[in-house]
């Protein structure tokens, strides 16, 4: 199957303007990739399916969410894809947290050239979230850390009422078992729309266990 924007349209209808913004994102990713290694080189032939559509499913699953916090944004996956899809939505904003200066430059370039509803926060996640005060409905993260580490990183914002929404692969059961040693969790595991081996894990409640 040819890797095109049709992979996104199969799970989420997009306007012509949104499609053009996504095309611009992909063009910028390809342009910056040789110098920044933004994604795994062996996935470049499947950018639309492996990356863009995989991230777009968050908006398909949670269409009413307006205020997102994306941790370890890197190439903007899923943060910038979410922000592009919400570019015409009133009140929408995606806060992208990234420590790497060059990747922050890429994120800001995409925001400027696509009109994505996003703000870049440069710095280590722990440092940025320690002083976090912006209202957030959902936290996203993809290919960043284990579930236990994600819970540790996002704890301040989860405690303030946000819901965690994390991409997880086929090793999720092992990650859940490890995280459950330290956390009492209420979660919903959504089957990925893109990869049957993967899940979108929604953390509805997370309380640290008292040891």
Image (spheres, rainbow, N blue to C red):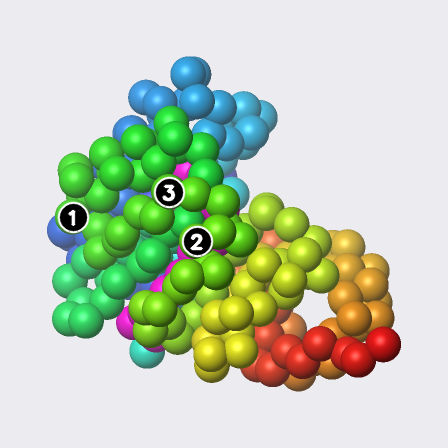
Residue designated by label 1: 115
From the viewer's perspective, is 81 left or right of 193? left
Q: Indicate which disc, 1 or 3, sits on the residue closer to the N terminus.
A: 1
Residue 155 coordinates in the image, percent (x, y):
58, 68
SS at badge 2? helix
> Which residues are the magenta region?
65-76
- Between tags 1 and 3, which lies in front? 3
Taking depth in this image into account, of 174 and 131 the one nearest to the observer is: 131
Residue 199 coordinates in the image, percent (x, y):
63, 63
Going 74% across and 55% down the picture, which residue do you hit?
Answer: 170
Image: 128 above or below 180: above
On-image quarter of the C terminus: bottom right
Q: Indicate which disc, 1 or 2, sits on the residue closer to the N terminus.
A: 1
Residue 71 is covered by the magenta coloring: yes
Circle 1 crowding by C-alpha within 10 Å: few under 14, some 14–19, many from 20: some
Residue 37 coordinates in the image, percent (x, y):
48, 24
Q: Quadrant of residue 62?
A: bottom left
Taking depth in this image into account, of 144 and 149 the one nearest to the observer is: 149
Kindly identify which numbered label has been placed on residue 144. none
Q: Quadrant of residue 33?
A: top left
Image: 79 above or below 187: above
Kindly identify which numbered label has been placed on residue 122. 3
Q: CA gap, disc 1 to disc 3?
A: 19 Å
Going 26% across and 38% down the picture, which residue do you hit?
Answer: 108
Going 59% across and 46% down the picture, which residue do you hit?
Answer: 143
Residue designated by label 2: 128
Q: Indicate which disc, 3 or 2, sits on the residue closer to the N terminus.
A: 3
From the viewer's perspective, is 142 left or right of 98? right
Mark 1–mark 3 CB contact (< 8 Å): no
């Amino acid at each position: 199957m040819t890797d095109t924007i049709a992979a996104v349209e199969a799970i989420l209808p997009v306007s012509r303007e949104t499609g053009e913004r996504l095309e611009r994102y992909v063009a910028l990713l390809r342009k910056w990739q040789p110098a920044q290694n933004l994604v795994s080189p062996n996935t470049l032939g499947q950018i639309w399916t492996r990356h863009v559509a995989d991230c777009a499913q968050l908006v398909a699953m949670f269409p009413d969410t307006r205020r997102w916090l994306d941790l370890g944004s890197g190439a903007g996956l899923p943060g910038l894809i979410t922000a592009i899809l919400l570019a015409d939505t009133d009140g929408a904003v995606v806060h992208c947290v990234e420590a790497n200066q060059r990747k922050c430059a890429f994120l800001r370039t995409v925001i400027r050239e696509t009109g994505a509803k996003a703000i870049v926060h440069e710095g280590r996640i722990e440092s940025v979230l320690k002083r976090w005060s912006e209202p957030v409905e959902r936290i996203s993260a993809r290919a960043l850390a284990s579930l236990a580490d994600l819970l540790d990183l996002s704890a301040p914002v989860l405690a303030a009422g946000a819901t965690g929404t994390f991409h997880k692969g086929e090793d999720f059961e092992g990650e859940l078992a490890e995280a459950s040693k330290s956390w009492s969790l209420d979660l919903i595991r959504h089957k990925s729309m893109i990869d049957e081996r993967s899940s979108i894990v929604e953390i509805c409640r997370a309380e640290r266990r008292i040891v």
